[in-house]
Image (cartoon, rainbow, N blue to C red):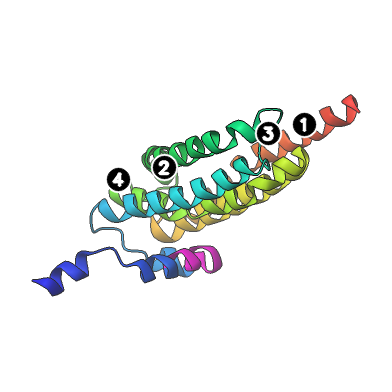
Amino acid sequence: MEGVMAEKGFNVQQFIDDSKSVLINPKAYFTSMPKTGGFAEPIVKAVIYGAIAGVLGMIWSIIGLSGVGRGIFGGMLGGGMGVMVLVGALIGSIIGLFIGAVIILVLSAICGGSTDFEANTRVSASLMVLYPISSLFGFAGGIHFLLGALISLLITLYGLYLLYNALVYALGGKEGTAKIIAIIIAVIPVLMLLSTLVCSRRMM
């Protein structure tokens, strides 16, 4: 009985290995990714990613290297704001997990891939590996808005590359359609950044 319980328990080392694999070799990871096994594992993964992101966001907030906790009252309110960043990240990770699953399910359906909600939820949880990475570079926005925007854009574009691999290799979507979807979505943040650069230059 203990052996069975251990097998069903959350494997921390597997979580670390999976996180590395998603980032370094997404094609191999999503090709072999388990698509069943319940919702407990993806929820735990999302919460862990959210907790890491929240802690990093709290640190940047406290030391004044983010939009939160800066200004005259940054010193007094930075700690309290930082705690709210952590709480918000934890709540947001769970909500984002399922909202992301629905969005991915729709995209997968467009690509002719799997519409199984659990499989799409597991993909959503795996893609959330970028949540703490985005938070890790959260200090960039505190240094300069455009630096933060550029780093955010690069992370977003890499996230779309991961999404493309997930749609094709985990959910069985059509490669051509998935590629078109990724490109179309990628145009949006690029145009937003270009618009921001143009506006800032005019203001200067």
Left or right of 123? Residue 55 is right
From this viewpoint, is residue 176 visible? no
Q: Earlier in the sequence, mark 3 or mark 1?
A: 3
* Picture disc at residue 195: 1
Mark 4: which secondary structure? helix
Q: In this figure, which residue is indicated by the disc labeled 4?
A: 117
Depicted 125 relative to depicted 109: above or below? below
Find disc 3 in the rendering and name its residue. Answer: 70
- Cα separation, mark 2 vs mark 4, equals 22 Å
Q: Quadrant of residue 150?
A: top right
Q: Give yes or no for contact between labels 4 and 3 (Cβ–Cβ under 8 Å).
A: no
- Going from N to C along the chain, the mark reached first, 4 or 1, is 4
- In the picture, measured across the screen, residue 26 lies left or right of residue 95, that is right
In the depicted view, which residue is nearer to us: 112 or 149? 149
Q: Quadrant of the N terminus?
A: bottom left
Q: Amino acid at mark 2?
A: Leu
Q: Secondary structure at mark 1?
A: helix
Residue picked out by circle 2: 90
Marks 3/2: CA distance?
A: 22 Å
Q: Residue 145 location, x and y as percent?
A: 75, 38
Is 202 magenta? The answer is: no
The CA span between labels 4 and 1 is 36 Å
Kindly report the distance in space between the C-alpha atoms of the residues bearing marks 1 and 2. Answer: 32 Å
Give the residue displayed 49% in from the left and 45% down from the top. Answer: 54
